[in-house]
C-alpha cells in the first residue's frame, strides 16, 4: 500500500505552514510520515511549490510536486497516485492530523479490501467527510484527472463520482484525543500541543 502525505495546503488561517509546526522539537510532517511508513511500504509527500519541495528533500523525504498547482487535496491525490496500478490502494493523509493512529489506517485498508467494487473508504461524521484521512484505489486517478481538467477540485464532488464506503468515526471513539482532530488556526495548534503533552508523546 502506498502512503500519500499532503503538504500543499495554503495554511491561510494558521499564518504559517502546518507541516513545519513543532511537536517534540520536530516538524509535524516527520511525525505523520512515520505513521504512514509504519503501515505503507511506499510513501510519497506531495508539495505544491518548489521551495517547499526543496525543504522536504533536505530531510531525505521522497517528495513530488502537484501536477495541478493550487488545486487542493484532489491535486495531491492525483499526483500521489502516479504509477500506481488500478487495483492497488493508497492511503491519503493530510499533514495536520497530529493524533492520527496507524491502527485506523490499517482498519481502513482492511475495510476497502472487504468491499469489492469500492473505490474509496472515507471516514464520516454526520455530513462532515474526512477525505484526507482515507483509502483510495489507484483507478480513481483518471477520475481525479478528469475533474481537475474541468476545474472541479472539490473533494466532495469527486467522491460523488466514486463508489465510496463511508465509515462513521464513532467506530474509532475509543481513541482519545480524536485522531481526526486537525489544526486550522494558532488556537488549534496550541490545543494540540497541550493534548500532545498530556499524552506523553
Image (cartoon, grey):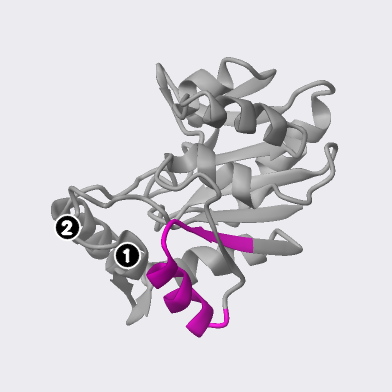
Q: Is residue 3 above or below residue 73?
A: below
How much space separates mark 1 and mark 2, taking CA atoms? 21 Å
* Residue at point 36%, 50% (across, down): 9
- Disc on res. 196: 1
Residue 53 is covered by the magenta coloring: yes
In the rendered view of the protein, which quadrant contains the C terminus?
bottom left
Label 1 SS: helix
Q: Is residue 56 above or below residue 181?
A: below
- Please state which of the two labelled residues, at mark 1 or mark 2, is closer to the viewer: 2
For this view, does 2 lie left or right of residue 125? right
For this view, does 3 lie left or right of residue 93? right
For this view, does 110 lie left or right of residue 96? right
In this view, the residue in front, 146 or 61, is: 146
Residue 132 can be seen, yes or no:
no
The spot of residue 47 in percent (x, y) is 47, 60
Q: Is residue 150 above or below residue 73?
A: above
Pointer 2 residue: 15
Q: Which residue range is magenta in the image?
A: 44-60
In this view, the residue in front, 9 or 32, is: 9
* Residue at point 47%, 24% (across, down): 152
Amino acid at each position: 500500500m502506498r502512503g500519500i502525505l499532503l503538504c500543499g495546503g495554503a495554511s491561510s488561517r494558521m499564518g504559517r505552514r502546518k507541516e513545519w509546526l513543532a511537536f517534540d522539537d520536530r516538524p509535524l510532517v516527520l511525525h505523520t510520515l512515520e505513521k504512514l511508513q509504519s503501515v505503507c511500504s511506499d510513501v510519497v509527500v506531495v508539495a505544491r511549490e518548489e521551495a517547499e519541495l526543496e525543504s522536504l528533500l533536505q530531510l531525505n523525504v521522497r517528495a513530488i510536486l502537484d501536477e495541478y498547482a493550487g488545486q487542493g487535496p484532489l491535486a495531491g491525490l492525483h499526483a500521489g497516485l502516479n504509477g500506481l496500478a488500478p487495483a492497488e490502494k493508497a492511503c491519503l493523509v493530510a499533514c495536520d492530523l497530529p493524533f492520527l493512529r496507524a491502527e485506523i489506517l490499517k482498519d481502513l485498508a482492511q475495510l476497502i479490501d472487504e468491499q469489492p467494487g469500492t473505490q474509496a473508504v472515507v471516514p464520516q461524521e454526520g455530513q462532515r467527510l474526512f477525505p484526507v484521512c482515507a483509502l483510495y484505489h489507484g483507478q480513481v486517478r483518471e477520475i481525479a484527472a478528469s475533474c481537475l481538467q474541468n476545474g472541479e477540485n472539490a473533494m466532495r464532488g469527486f467522491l460523488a463520482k466514486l463508489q465510496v464506503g463511508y465509515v462513521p468515526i464513532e467506530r474509532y471513539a475509543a481513541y482519545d484525543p480524536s485522531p481526526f482532530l486537525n489544526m486550522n488556526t494558532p488556537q488549534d495548534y496550541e490545543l494540540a500541543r497541550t493534548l500532545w503533552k498530556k499524552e506523553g508523546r
